[in-house]
Amino acid sequence: MASVQAGGSSIQQFQLAKESELRIEVGDDSPLRLRLVSGTGEIFGTELPPENWLSFPPSLKFAVFTWHGATIELDGKSELAYVADETPMVSYINVHAILDGRRARAKNSGSDLESSQGPRVIVVGPTDSGKSSLCKMLLSWACKQSWKPTYVDLDIGQGSITVPGCIAATPVEMPIDPVEGIPLEMPLVYFYGHATPSINVELYKVLVKELAQILERQFTGNVESRAAGMVINTMGWVEGVGYELLLHAIETLKADVVLVLGQEKLCSMLKDVLKGKDIVKLHKSGGVVPRNTKLRQRSRSSRIREYFYGLANDLSPHSSIASFSDLSIFRIGGGPQAPRSALPIGAEPAADPTRLVPVNINADLLHSILAVSYAKGIDQIISSNVAGFIYITDIDIHRKKITYLAPCPGDLPSRFLLVGTLAWSES
C-alpha cells in the first residue's frame, strides 16, 4: 500500500511490500519517531531493532528499505512520507556481494601485500546523487559480515566523519547507527579549512596524499584492515578541476573499483582514462533530494553544531580563555613564493599553496572554526593531522584574550592552530 502524508502529527502506519522502501523527510521544527512493528527493515544498510522507537532529528531525510516486507509506524510531523517500490537496492547489494567475495579472497591469500589487499571502492557522481548514502550501506553490509573496512571521506563540503572543511578516514567496525551516523573512535583528520576545493586545489591534493600515506602504513601492518579495504566518498564536483581532483584521488588512494552514481557522461570519461579498474554505473535512488546552496549551508552549520553540542543537544562544550601569546595561529596558502626581484624579468610571483602564513589575532577571527594541530613544531603543521576543533566566541583586543568553545575542558593538545574560511554562528 502506498501512502502519502504531509503535515499530519498523529501516529501513521505504513505497510511495505518486499523490496520497497518508505522515504521520509523529517520536518524542520521537531523530531520524528519511528518503529518497526513487524517484518524487517534497514536504514542505510543497518537493520532496525523490532518494536523500539527511534527518534530522528529535524530536517533529516532517509529511507527504510525492506527485503521481505515490513510494517512501520511514524509518530510526529513529517514533511513527507511515502512508499516507493522502485529502488536500486538490488544492484547495490549485488555490488556488496562482489566486494565481499574479494575481501574473502584477499584474507585467504596469505601475506603477499598485493594479493592480500581487499577492494578499495570509490563512489563518484554529481551533487545529490546519493554517494554518502551508498557508502554507508556498503560499510554497514560489510560490518554485518564481520569486516572492518576503512571509510575515507573526501567531501569537504559536507563532512560525514567530522566537521566540513576536512578530509578524514576512520575504521568502521559495526553497522552505522541510522541516527548517530559514523562512529568516531579513531578518526584520522586533515584540516583543509574551506568548503570548496577551488580555494586551494594544490593543498587539497597534498592533504589527500598525506592521508593516503598514513593509510598505506596502517594497512601494511594490519592484515585484517587490509583485506577489508576502503570505501571512499567524494565531492559532487565532477567537471573541470573537480574531475582532475577525482582522478588524483583514484590514483593516490589506489582505488580499484569505481562506482559511478547517476551520470553516463562521467562513467564514459572514466572508462576512457582508467585502465585495469572496475568501473560500474549504478542508478541513483529516486528518493535523493536535490539541495540548493542555502540548504547546503544549513547542513554545514548543523554539522558544526553537532560537533560541539551533539545530535540531540546532549553534549556540554567547555568555554575557555587563552592569552594571545599562548596560541600560534596559521593559515595555509597565500603569499608569493619569491619576491619579484628574484624572478626572471616579466614573471609574476605565484601564490604558494602550501605556505604557512602566521595570522594576527584580531576581530576577523570571531566566529571562526579553528583546527588544533597535533604538530610538535611549525615544520610539521602541513603533514600533521588534527586533534579537534575550537570555535572563537569572543576576542578582547585590549586584554589580549581570546574566548573559545571546545568539546571538552582542559588545555589544548597543541598551541598550533589552523584557520581557513570555515565560520559558524550559534544563533
Image (cartoon, rainbow, N blue to C red):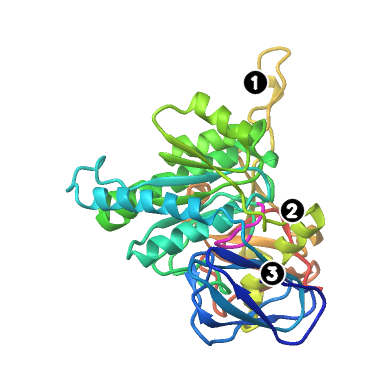
Seen from the viewer's position, the closer of residues 422 and 6 is 6
Q: Is residue 9 left or right of residue 172?
A: right
Identified by mark 1, the residue type is Ala
Residue holding disc 2: 290
Residue holding disc 1: 342
Q: Examine the structure image and report whether residue 113 is included in the region drawn in magenta.
A: no
Q: Which residue in the rendered view is the most extreme toward the left?
A: 110
Residue holding disc 3: 2
Question: Callout 3: few (<14), some (14-19), or many (20+) C-alpha neighbours within 10 Å?
Answer: some
Task: Say if mark 1 contacts mark 2, CB within 8 Å.
Answer: no
Residue 258 position, x and y percent, is 48, 40
Identified by mark 3, the residue type is Ala
Residue 179 position, x and y percent, is 58, 74
Q: Is residue 293 left or right of residue 100?
A: right
Q: Earlier in the sequence, mark 1 or mark 3?
A: 3
Q: Earlier in the sequence, mark 1 or mark 2?
A: 2
Magenta part, dominant SS: loop
Task: Give the vertical position of 91 relative to 363 (above or below).
Answer: above
**Region in magenta:** 157-163
